[in-house]
Image (spheres, grey):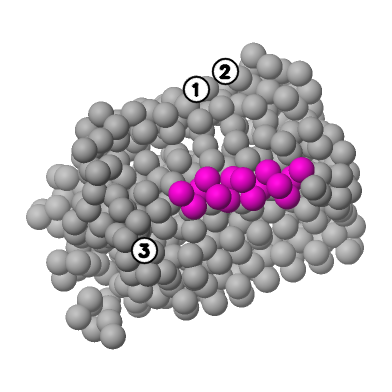
Amino acid sequence: MTNLFKPKFSSEFVRNSLTIFSGNVVAQAIPFLAEPVLARLYNPTDFAVLAVYLSVANLFSIIATGRYEMAIMLPKEDKKAVNVLGLSVLISIGVSLLSFLIVWIFNSRICKILNNEDVSSYLYLVPLSVISVAWYQIFNYWNSRKKRFKNVMFSKTTQSVTNVLVNLGFAIKSLGLVMGQFLGYLFGSFVLLFSFLRKDKDKLTQISRKDMKEVAVQYQDFPKINSIHAFGDVLKQSGEVFLLSYFYFKDKVGLHSRTLRLLFAPSSMIGSAVGQVFYQKASETYQNGGDLRGLLIKVLKTMALIAFPVFLTVALFGDDLFAWFLGEPYRMAGAYGRYLAPWLFFNFITMPVSQIPLIVSKQKKAFLISILGHTMYLSAVIIGGLNKNILLGFILLSIFSTLYYIGIILWFIKISSIKKSEIV
């Protein structure tokens, strides 16, 4: 892997990537190995409750900081960065309170729309999920900025272990699944928060209302554009769950959620590790006028070489693999995976480099392109639903999404050639 990157930054990039990757291996291996047990402790309708709960919680979580936390990596001075952090924390508290009011007032209506009354009591946990995920992301970016990737690794492991232990320890209907998600992020955020307080507590004195207002204006594209973009991404995912809940039985939603959980595991394990380091290194490379395009292409090639044998195996033997690993009731989940494999392959390749538009100030165009992608994605699910044929929907989803990601990759390569001096 070291010969894929230029000598001037190869050792640091690879070392940091491997640090995050090792943490991701542990963090993803634990729930992955627990899946056969969980599949026998819970039934598909329990996983459907989890999927619906997360679909609601994620709509708030994705905008819980106004996306300002992503700007923590960008300033050269720590003073600006810590004020972005302070701003992100304040916004997250406000969004969490807002989510509580919405859940409290509209609980029964939300359950009726989602066609799932079982999720009602769990919706009151949404505000806690929102703030725990937000703080996890905020302090994750701060630790990445400071290149404390071992802290990031430990937090991921803590989040994963907590999630699985709660899943196994509270296997009462869907209670353990929902509680595991919330408590996992909560304990993971504590790890990162304690690291910040131990090493950077003195920087809290640099946070001021005046400076937070300044960085809020300087990085206003994040809430104005990126947050809408990110909300659209989550709305696409949540919309898929909502539509599946509307058109099909709960067990279909549960099976599909298991399919994506397992098949996205390689992306989370490897893609997010490389992506976290890539964002830091790519930002630095761009600021210094380096070869961003070269770095991008080498990462894309590496990810493709890793992903191809994995998703080819899924495309050929997905149904048998799922039946063997999770049990015969989940054979259909593997069949879904066979059709979705091409889309997931290109998603895997694109995930680590998805911050390119942020780095080169192309957020507006990225948002407009994403609207097209979301429309294609949900259209496939709707067509399948109207025809009462879930496999037709997944086949179209895979075709549409594959074409979309190929276009995204080509666009990323084009815009990565833009130099900072060329931005007006």
Marks 1 and 2 close (CB-CB < 8 Å): yes
Amino acid found under the numbered disc labelled 3: Lys
Q: Depth check: give the residue in front, 203 or 155.
A: 203
| x and y, in percent, of residue 49 in the image | 77, 36
Instruction: Say which of 175 and 376 sits in front.
Output: 175
Q: Is residue 4 visible?
A: no
The quadrant holding residue 342 is bottom right
Q: Residue at x 72, y 36 (%)?
A: 124
Crowd band around label 1 with a 10 angstrom C-alpha radius: few (<14), some (14–19), many (20+): many
Q: Which residues are magenta?
A: 90-104
Residue type, label 2:
Leu
Q: Secondary structure at mark 1?
A: helix
Distance CA(mark 1)–CA(mark 3):
38 Å
User: Reading the chain from its start, which is encountered first: label 3 or label 2?
Assistant: 2
Specify the label residue 165 is tagged with: 2
Q: Position of residue 199 (x, y in %)?
A: 22, 33
Q: Is residue 206 magenta?
A: no
Which amino acid lies under the numbered mark 1 shown in the image of this protein? Val
Mark 1 vs mark 2, CA separation in Å? 6 Å
Tell me, for residue 161, which label it has, or none.
1
Separation of marks 3 and 2 at Cα, in angstroms: 42 Å
